[in-house]
Image (spheres, rainbow, N blue to C red):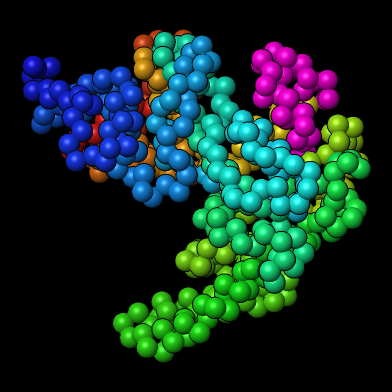
């Protein structure tokens, strides 16, 4: 077969030689897709190729993903259909005291039937769920391109047992499971502010400030244990190091400064800059307080519109961001049709659900953004760091696309919507050809060209 003078190689997903059996089963659930590779000339990343390549990339890299790698996307009718999402690039660990609504929040996030009981330690094993990041742009793109399905960016949430005062010394169960969130990118601390006499507070009274201090203290103590355990080893390695003596000494210095900060009761994320500590130097130790914190206040319905109360809570955790939600209302929202959910939100003075806010704040806190690809098969969002170049963005789909990157056809989402089609956007001069130095912008709609 020939196209434009270049030989085309047809590859179907029916060839599974060398793949593990679970991978074969997952691939066989996908529609047969042809991957067209132009021999000897640049290949364009079309929708079919992206589908096949992304599927194989997911299979190849799943060992490095610490959450389920196959989750749910949506077809145009809103029905769920199993599709392989991009490897999860944002993982948020959920922590808090017992009975603050962590599992209720997790249930609403993932629509899982996780035990949510009003007694301590209802969550024994950590719960892990992967959810799509709400992005209304994908539905619009799917209409423009006639996409069969929508695939949002993915966020993983990990819910562990409640942490109590003294957890670092063996009290309760939470400290046992802190290892499950050490690989997370951010920590979501759920704080109880709701009043309900039927739900016992582990400390005897509802006091958000005290709860925050308790959790922070236990996380600091857990990090101190990690640092104190590592320091003797690092001191020995520094003494024995020769060629890499400077690197070893720098690491030891960073860990020593981190210990001093923790000894003063300061979280590393809050105090590192002033102490001259580069958090990147501490990444190897996976310290909990080196991660950014997001605070979710689980409130009563009337507190959602109480600005004075919310300002008081924000002051407790500034400069971190605060999200206010009623976990019970969030549980109701996920079960309602879109129109009814919006009506319920507006009835309590809200424009966006707390769950949507959490996903967006997580992205913003970690400096992440999304770019978009679209075609007849799917409209998809891909997660990249703010400041990523076009080749780096291409590499999120497949490393071959980064290695063989030539150029990218880019159009801004708003420009595409205004034009109504790619053809019209091109005729208006809104589609740009960008090279290797182009810095991606949130909402870029992209087609990559590469040669490998």
Name above or below for residue 299 compared with residue 284.
above
Q: In this view, does 143 lie to the left or right of 270?
A: left
- Residue 69 visible to an observer of this rendering: yes
Quadrant of image for the N terminus: top left
* Position of residue 137 measured from the top left corner of the image (x, y, whole percent): 53, 22
- Please tell me how many numbered marks the rendered image carries: 0
Q: What stretch is highlighted in magenta?
A: 320-349
Q: Nearer the viewer, residue 66 or 11?
A: 66
Q: Is residue 66 within the magenta segment?
A: no
Q: Is residue 6 left or right of residue 389?
A: left
Q: Is residue 331 within the magenta segment?
A: yes
Quadrant of image for the C terminus: top left
State the image quarter where residue 104 is shown.
Answer: top right
Name above or below for residue 199 compared with residue 348.
below
Q: Nearer the viewer, residue 362 or 19?
A: 19
State the image quarter where residue 249 is shown.
Answer: bottom left
- Residue 274 visible to an observer of this rendering: no
State the image quarter where residue 53 is shown.
Answer: top left
* Position of residue 99 measured from the top left corner of the image (x, y, whole percent): 78, 47
Q: Is residue 384 left or right of residue 313?
A: left
Residue at (57, 64) in percent of width and height: 287
Outermost residue to the bottom = 239
Name above or below for residue 89 compared with residue 231.
above
* Position of residue 338 measured from the top left corner of the image (x, y, whole percent): 66, 16
Residue at (85, 57) in percent of width and height: 203
Q: Which of 314 and 133 is in front in this view?
A: 133
């Amino acid at each position: 077969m020939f196209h434009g003078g270049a030989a085309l190689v047809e590859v179907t997903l029916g060839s599974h030689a060398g793949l593990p059996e679970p991978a074969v089963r997952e691939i066989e659930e996908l529609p047969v897709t042809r991957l067209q590779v132009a021999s000897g000339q640049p290949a364009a990343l079309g929708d079919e190729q992206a589908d096949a390549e992304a599927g194989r990339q997911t299979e190849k890299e799943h060992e490095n993903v610490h959450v389920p790698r196959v989750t749910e996307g949506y077809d145009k009718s809103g029905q769920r259909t199993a599709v392989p999402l991009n490897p999860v690039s944002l993982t948020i660990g959920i922590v808090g005291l017992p009975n603050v609504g962590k599992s209720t929040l997790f249930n609403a996030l993932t629509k899982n039937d996780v035990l949510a009981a009003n007694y301590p330690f209802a969550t024994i094993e950590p719960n892990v769920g992967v959810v799509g990041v709400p992005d209304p742009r994908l539905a619009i793109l799917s209409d423009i391109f006639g996409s069969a399905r929508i695939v949002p960016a993915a966020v993983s949430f990990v819910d562990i047992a409640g942490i109590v005062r003294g957890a670092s010394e063996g009290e309760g169960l939470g400290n046992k499971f802190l290892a499950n969130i050490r690989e997370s990118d951010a920590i979501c601390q759920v704080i109880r502010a709701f009043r309900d006499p039927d739900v016992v507070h582990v400390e005897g009274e509802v006091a958000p400030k005290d709860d925050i201090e308790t959790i922070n203290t236990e996380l600091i103590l857990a990090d101190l244990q990690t640092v104190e355990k590592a320091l003797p080893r690092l001191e020995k390695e520094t003494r024995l190091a020769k060629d890499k003596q400077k690197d070893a000494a720098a690491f030891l210095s960073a860990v020593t400064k981190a210990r001093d900060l923790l000894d003063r009761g300061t979280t590393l994320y809050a105090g590192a800059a002033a102490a001259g500590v580069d958090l990147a130097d501490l990444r190897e130790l996976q310290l909990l307080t080196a991660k950014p914190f997001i605070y979710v206040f689980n409130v009563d319905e009337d507190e959602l519109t109480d600005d004075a109360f919310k300002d008081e809570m924000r002051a407790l955790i500034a400069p971190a961001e605060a999200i206010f939600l009623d976990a019970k209302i969030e549980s109701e929202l996920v079960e309602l049709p879109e129109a009814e959910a919006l009506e319920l939100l507006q009835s309590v003075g809200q424009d966006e659900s707390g769950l949507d806010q959490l996903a967006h704040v997580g992205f913003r806190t970690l400096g992440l953004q999304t770019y978009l690809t679209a075609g007849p098969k799917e409209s998809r969002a891909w997660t990249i760091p703010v400041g990523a170049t076009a080749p780096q963005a291409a590499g999120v789909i497949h490393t071959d696309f980064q290695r063989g990157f030539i150029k990218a056809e880019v159009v801004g989402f708003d420009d595409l919507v205004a034009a109504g089609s790619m053809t019209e956007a091109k005729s208006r001069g809104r589609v740009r050809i960008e090279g290797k130095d182009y810095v991606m912008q949130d909402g870029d709609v992209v087609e990559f060209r590469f040669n490998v």
